[in-house]
Amino acid sequence: MAIRDGEKLLEMMRAYQIPCLLASAADLDLFEKLILSPRTARDVATSSGCDLRAVTILLDALTAVKVIVKQDDLYSISPELAPLLSEGSPQSVMAMIRHQANCMRRWARLPWTIRMGKPDLPGPSIRGENADRKSFIEAMNVVSRGVADRLVREIHPGNVRCVLDLGGASGTWTLAWLKAAPESRAVIFDLPQVIPMARERFSVSPFAGRVEMCAGDYYADDLPRGADLVWVSAIIHQNSPEQNRALYRRIAAALEPGGWIFIRDIVMESSRVAPVAGAMFAANMLSATEGGNCYTWTEIQEDLQSAGFKAVQQVRRNEGMNSVVRARL
C-alpha cells in the first residue's frame, strides 16, 4: 500500500540525521578515542584537532540516540557497543560505517546525477582516497564474514580443484571456498592497489600456501587460467549489461572445460520494484557508476548464455546480496 501519511514522509526525510552523526564520528576517529576510558568533550576535541563546540554537540547528539554514554561531563562507549566501534576488534563494523558514509555523500548528489545520467561524484572523504579504498575492502569483509562459510557449504558443487575469486581482495570468500574443500586451491584476482591488503590478511593465515595473488583489472586484462570455478561476488551490479557480457566472455575463455561460474548478487523480480533492497541498491549504483544496476533472473540468464554458459540456475534465493546463480561451460 502506498504511503498516504504526510508525517510518515517527513519521518523518512529526517532519517538522514543519525547516519550523518555516525559518519562524522567514524570519519574523525572519535569513537576510538572513547573506547579505552571516558573522556570529556574538551579531551576529544583536543586530541582530534576539532572544534570544541562542534564536538560537544556531536557527542551530545550521539548520547541522545543511545550510541554513546554520558555521565556528568564524561563520554564513553558502552561495553556492548565497544567491540563494534573498535578498530581492532574482529567484530568491528567501523569499515562499513565509513563505506556507508561515502555512499551517503554520493546519494546527496542524486539530483545532479539524475539530470546528467552519470554520477556526480563528490570526491574522497575527509580521510582521503587511500583510506576510503581500504574502508571499502574491509567493509566487504564486514558484510560477508557472518554468512560466507555457511553459504559456500550450501552451494558447493563438489570436486573443485581451483577457485578464481574475482575482485576478492577482502579474502573472505576465498577463505570460505578453501575451508569447504580442503584439497582445493584459490587465486585472488584484484586491482594492484588492493592485492597488498589480501597479502597482509593471508600472511597470518594457515591457508596462505593454497592461495595465489594475481593483480589485474578484470575489465581489461586476461584472467588467470586453470580454474574450474570462478566466483563473481557482488560485482555484476557495478556493471552495465554490456560490461557483464564482456566479463562473462573473459571468464569463459579462462575457465577449464566444464567449469563453473557462480554469481553472488541481488536478483530482481521482473517488476524491478522487489526485493526492496535491490531497488535501493540500484539507486546506489546510479549514484556511483555509469552503467551499474540490479538485474533480473532473466537478464542474468541471457547474458550468461550469450557467453556460452549453459544450465543456468538460481541455486539460492535471498532478499539481499546473497542470492546465487550458477552456470557451466
Image (cartoon, rainbow, N blue to C red):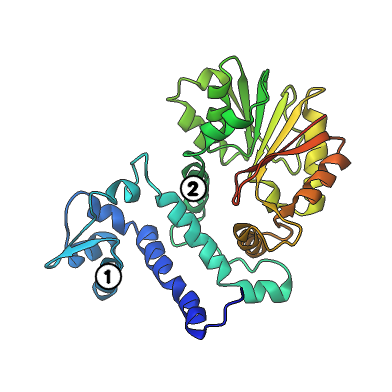
Identify the mark at residue 64; answer none if there is no mark.
1
Q: Is residue 283 left or right of residue 34?
A: right
- The reply to whether residue 124 is in sight is no
Q: Residue 283 or 201: which is nearer the viewer? A: 283
Q: Is residue 163 left or right of residue 72?
A: right
Q: Residues within 10 Å of mark 1 (few under 14, many from 20)?
A: few
Q: Residue at x 43, y 56 (%)?
A: 97
**Which residue sits furthest left?**
72
The numbered mark at residue 139 is 2
In x, y percent, where is residue 69?
Answer: 21, 61
What percent of the width, then of the height, locates residue 258?
81, 23
Q: Which mark is residue 114?
A: none
Q: Percent position (x, y) of residue 256? A: 79, 23
Label 2 crowding class (10 Å Cα cut-off): few <14, some 14-19, many 20+?
many
- The image shows residue 266, relative to residue 48, as above or below, that is above
Residue at 56% x, 40% y is 194
